[in-house]
Image (spheres, rainbow, N blue to C red):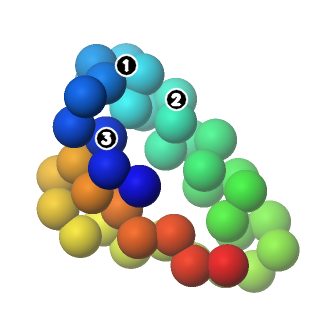
Amino acid sequence: MVLTDVTDAEAKQIVDFATGLVFGPGGAMDRVDRELFLLQP
């Protein structure tokens, strides 16, 4: 998930939502760079 074209407020909301989606079924999420996240189901 690349968040380079969104504002900081939007990026925070997207990351919060994605965190729930990923960790709910037992997945993982890694921060690769400041605005780049790796989501693992």
Residue 41's place in the image compared with 1, above or below, is: below
Residue appearing at x 70%, y 53% in the figure: 20
Q: Secondary structure at mark 2?
A: helix
In the rendering, at what x and y percent does residue 16 appear? 56, 41
Pick whichever of labels 3 and 1 is earlier in the sequence.
3
Residue, disc 1:
9
In the rendering, at what x and y percent does residue 7 appear? 28, 19
Q: In the displayed image of the protein, which residue is found farthest to the right?
A: 25
Pick whichever of labels 3 and 2 is earlier in the sequence.
3
15 horizontally vs 35: left or right: right
- What's under tag 1, amino acid-wise? Ala
Q: How many residues crowd around disc 1 within 10 Å: few (fewer than 14), some, or many (20 or more)?
A: few
Q: Quadrant of the N terminus?
A: bottom left
Q: Which mark is residue 13?
A: 2
Q: How many residues crowd around disc 3 within 10 Å: few (fewer than 14), some, or many (20 or more)?
A: some
Residue appearing at x 42%, y 32% in the figure: 12
Give the label, 3 or 1, closer to the camera: 3
In the rendering, at what x and y percent does residue 13 appear? 52, 29
Residue, disc 3:
3
